């Protein structure tokens, strides 16, 4: 690495390059969450229960956390473009393996691998932070986080329609093709990314150092545990969405249920506006506002789940608040040491996605026990706990 190279460049990321990164972030994120939209199709094709197919889908979330811990640390010593290129190609191969799975065990293993490799956004976000001025990090993060949401819900909607048309297996193959086709423009966008700070440590030592950096950073821990609870609530409600909408009393088709994901898509398009609010009023203050909106919308699920229109409105505010809080919490965590953003992002994201991933298992379990009403109570409790952690945790200015 050239030690004379600056660790920050304030003119390296242009709107076009940011757009290219955002598109790829959205596509890579969709590969992790699309299995949730295919639960009914997967369970029918493999001959397993909805609970088993929920575990298959949740395996991608735990794989995502594992990938953050063991793959993202390469970002401290490897060019972002190199890491993204290698991971993207192997991700496409893992998706093809998932499409060929003939048993629940094989599907679980393949989708776990997809999760491990699908954390490309966690490589791109620190690189984008190094490419922009400090006062623009809120907007940059929010654009990329918003892209995750657009990919997540746009992917769900398209996957539901596609599964009815060509089946869930060819839908997964289509995801693999999208990853490969958008890779060249992503590598071009990362061409101006400055090199990471670098480290003389071995890879395993880097993983250990990332975990230690979290232990000694109370601001990062508060932000991570807050967002873990938020993500747990998010995964809980969306993991059971298809099961709720296709059952009593609504009896929607899988395609109709998937199209409700467009509500989340609209919320994702508004997330960059949240970033401007973060830059203007401060990340901690705005995160508190987002968490309050999440608590109110989560509690409203109980009263609106049988009315599709009102339910959709509530889900919009809940989803917007979830992703806006992620942007605010991530800004706070990375701002504690911008020159080591990759390491901090590893610790933050691992905690968030590992703990939050349990929501993908807890939601279906709660749904089996008490239906959507019980899930509504669960997500409200998680949102309330998140607000408590935000209120009483360590503070950071800005």
Image (cartoon, grey):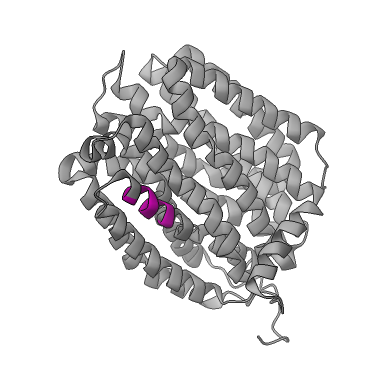
**From the viewer's perspective, is residue 192 above or below residue 57?**
below
Asked whether residue 280 appears in the rendered view, the answer is yes
Give the image location of residue 84, x and y in percent: 47, 69
Question: What segment is highlighted magenta in the picture?
Answer: 106-113
| Residue at 39 percent of width and 28 percent of height | 241
Q: Is residue 110 magenta?
A: yes
Residue drawn at point x = 75 percent, y = 38 percent = 285
Please identify the quarter of the rendering in which residue 176 is found: bottom left
Query: What secondary structure predominates along the stretch shown in magenta?
Result: helix
Q: Residue at x 16, y 46 (%)?
A: 166
Residue 36 placement (x, y as % from top left): 38, 39
Q: Position of residue 254 (x, y in %)?
A: 26, 31
The quarter of the rendered structure image containing the N terminus is bottom right
Q: Is 382 positioned to the left or the right of 266 in the image?
A: right
Q: Is residue 269 magenta?
A: no
Front-most of residues 57 and 109: 109
Residue lying at 43% horizontally and 33% vertically, measured from the top left: 239
The percent coordinates of residue 85 (x first, y second) are: 44, 72
State the count of labels: 0
Tell me: 116 left or right of 13: left
């Amino acid at each position: 690495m050239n030690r004379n190279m600056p660790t920050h460049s304030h003119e390296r990321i242009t709107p076009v390059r940011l757009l290219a990164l955002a598109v790829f972030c959205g596509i890579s994120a969709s590969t992790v969450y699309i299995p949730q939209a295919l639960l009914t199709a997967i369970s029918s094709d493999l001959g397993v229960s909805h609970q088993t197919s929920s575990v298959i889908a949740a395996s991608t979330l735990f794989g995502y956390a594992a990938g953050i811990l063991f793959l993202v640390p390469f970002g401290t010593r490897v060019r972002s473009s190199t890491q993204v290129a290698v991971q993207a190609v192997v991700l496409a191969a893992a998706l093809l393996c998932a499409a060929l799975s003939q048993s629940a065990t094989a599907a679980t293993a393949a989708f776990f691998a997809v999760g491990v490799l699908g954390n490309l956004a966690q490589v791109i976000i620190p690189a984008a932070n190094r490419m922009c001025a400090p006062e623009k990090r809120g907007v940059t993060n929010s654009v990329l986080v918003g892209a995750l949401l657009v990919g997540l819900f746009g992917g769900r909607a398209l996957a539901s329609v596609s599964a009815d048309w060509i089946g869930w297996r060819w839908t997964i193959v289509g995801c693999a093709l999208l990853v490969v086709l958008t890779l060249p423009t992503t590598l071009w966008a990362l061409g101006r990314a400055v090199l990471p700070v670098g480290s003389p440590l071995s890879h395993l030592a880097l993983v250990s150092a990332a975990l230690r950096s979290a232990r000694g950073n109370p601001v990062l821990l508060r932000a991570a545990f807050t967002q873990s609870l938020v993500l747990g609530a998010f995964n809980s409600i969306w993991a059971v969405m298809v099961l709720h909408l296709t059952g009593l009393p609504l009896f929607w088709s899988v395609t109709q249920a998937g199209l409700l994901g467009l509500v989340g898509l609209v919320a994702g398009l508004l997330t960059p506006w949240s970033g401007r609010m973060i830059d203007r009023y401060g990340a901690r203050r705005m995160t508190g506002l987002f968490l309050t909106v999440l608590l109110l919308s989560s509690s409203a699920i109980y009263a609106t789940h049988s009315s599709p229109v009102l339910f959709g409105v509530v889900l919009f505010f809940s989803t917007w608040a979830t992703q806006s809080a992620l942007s605010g919490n991530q800004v706070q965590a990375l701002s504690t040491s911008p020159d080591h953003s990759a390491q901090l992002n590893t610790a933050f994201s691992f905690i968030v996605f590992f703990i939050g991933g349990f929501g993908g298992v807890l939601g279906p379990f709660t749904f089996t026990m008490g239906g959507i009403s019980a899930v509504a109570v669960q997500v409200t409790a998680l949102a309330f706990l998140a607000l408590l952690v935000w209120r009483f945790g360590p503070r950071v200015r800005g």
